[in-house]
Amino acid sequence: MLTIPVMKQTIPVLVLVMLLGIARADDPILEIRASQTAGKVSPMLYGLMTEEINHAYDGGLYAELIQNRAFTDDATEPIHWAAVQANGAAANIALDPAQPFNGEFRTSLRLQVVSASPSAAAGVANDGYWGIPVKPDTRYQASFYAKAAPGFSGPLTVAIVSTNGTLTYAQAQVRHITSEWQRYETTLKTGSVQPTAAARLTLSVTNPATVWFGPVSLFPPTWKNRPNGLRPDLMQMLVDLKPAFLRLPGGNYLEGDTIQTRFDWKKTLGPVSQRPGHPGCWGYRSSDGLGLMEFLLWCEDMGAEPVLAVYAGYSLKGAYVKPGEDLEPFVQEALEEIEYVTGPTTTKWGAQRAEDGHPKPFPLHYVEIGNEDWFDKSGSYDGRFAQFQMAIKTKYPRLKCISTVGNEQPADKRVHTVVPGVLDEHYYRSAAEFLKDAPTRFERYDRSGPEIFVGEWAAYEEVKPWESASRQLPRTPTMKAALGDAAWMAAMERNSDLISMQCYAPLLVNVNAGASQWRPDLIGYDALRAFGSPSYYAFQMFSRHHGDSILKATLTEGPLQSVVTRDSRTGRITIKLVNPQPAPQAVAIHLNEVRSVAPEADAIILAADPNDGNSIEEPTKVMPVTSKVRGIGPSFSYVAPASSIVVLQVDAR
Ligand code: AHR
């Protein structure tokens, strides 16, 4: 069959022919007023939300490959570490708080080698985050801190080996180990190997010895080769979404279970060997290797700006700080954080940012005060928000403060003594609920109220993310959820005169068993591979294709949902359609108030069985295809395929 090349796939011509149909009297009608705008599309509309959940950073985007690198993930056992005892060598390992690495890491890993020889090495091995990804012809930066007891001074071999110990993928030797803490660094280079994650990092010796280890690290190549950087395949997927902003650092992760375990930004700066890390709120410890500076560089590398969420005196287990004097230290902490992000180098925290490698201030327009503060049963949020907003606006009048209690929450929970600059609303709903609510939800909003940030949203199929049954489901959503997501995005884009920003949540999930706490998530991965869910591609279709003006358009009530925007510079009209039905649906499209229309349009179509999704094994089962549609004019009939999301781009004058 004749095929036309599209994106990474091909689409049969037969399908293209079906897309334009003969108009029938009872088809839904989309009337577009091409010269009448209903408002501007917010230039910040499409962004990303992030937090340490599902091993999003450690074991995910943050490229460090060693799990429990500083031996702090468990108080009694060196979890993820094992003794290496090849060919009858004898060794044991243990945490050794009597030999702390430093004031931040109050323990070390002790290796005691009782017997070893050149043919029977002994040492320690780390199993990584569900394996160490081995790729051909790749350079890995290994580093570790160590000191040896008298009687041993080296050499020590650093290697990436297969889990069963039979294959060595790369190795290097450190000749001399001293009796004082010292950092050692070496490069490991693989040859032409088969990619695998069934590997671990070993540090081994060939004589009896006692060696203590401090933080051990292994980095593959990173995005833009940044030291302590991010995983390139995931970064590419994020950049491909063209995000305008990154909401950071959470979510629940900002608040922590307790005040002590909040995201304490000052402790996430500086050399990683001095970042203590902290217990996260999702059941595992965070290394804080991805700290505030790394968040900001991540934004910069995506061409996005931070939406900075500051800790606002409420933590998940219910502790809160009373507004007034008690809250003041936290307000100051937030002001300093803003100074770190935006201040000139003549300020204390601007100078610290320069010392941390980035003299140029980062752009910042939005500061979020807390997260989901409707959970605060004390009723203190109104006072806490007011105190933060007052202090921030006094020092930084141009910044907009976001309240975390939006219109989807009961009125008595909302801030009422002051007017917040922005309201953050969160929507985790079934696809069916999104499809039902989308046509009118935001149209009902009062346009004179604060702007809206939909700071977390996602459609699930049937099972709610917080129900235990959700743990049995694939971590990323199916096409069914993506159809709900697309209807919701159409609603937000139609109302983007009011909704200035929106972001799906959660963004990232390590799909290994036991690695995640929440589904559905936009992007899945293991140590070696990554894939986008249908919702990822739906988001990409929306974020990459839209005009700057919302056009007035009406669609006959029925199965389809839509949004129409126009690029005021080129005149190009972008029509987005969502057909959630299991059958193709024709629609009569009338482009009013245009002088001429190009006969050919670009179409991007994501269509699949609602139960289909992508996975590590089938990463591209559901993918958008790009094609040309002919026969376009001021009035034309278009057939949206069954269960589809369509972006039509029409050139009109
Ligand atoms: O996205 C997962 C969690 O959902 C976020 O941490 C929290 O803000 C929300 O309840």
Image (cartoon, helix red, strand yellow):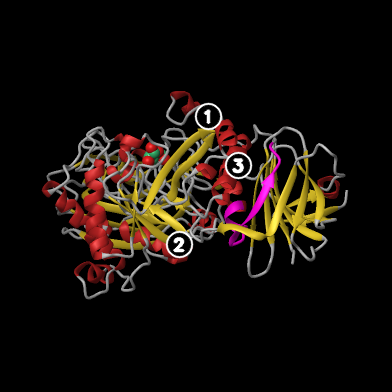
Residue at numbered disc 1: 473
Extent of the magenta region: 542-557
Q: Amino acid at mark 1?
A: Leu
39 vs 269, nearest the viewer: 39
Q: Is residue 555 magenta?
A: yes
Q: Position of residue 535 (x, y in %)?
A: 58, 43
| Percent of width and height locating residue 351 | 23, 71
Q: CA distance from mark 3 to mark 2?
A: 25 Å
Q: Which residue is mark 3?
A: 487
Look at the numbered disc 2 and say if its residue's Cβ is closer than 8 Å to ligand 1: no
Q: Nearer the viewer, residue 90 or 577?
A: 577
State how far apart marks 3 and 1 are (Cα): 23 Å
Q: Earlier in the sequence, mark 3 or mark 2?
A: 2
Q: Which residue is mark 2?
A: 304
Q: Earlier in the sequence, mark 3 or mark 1?
A: 1
Nearer to me, 75 or 197: 75
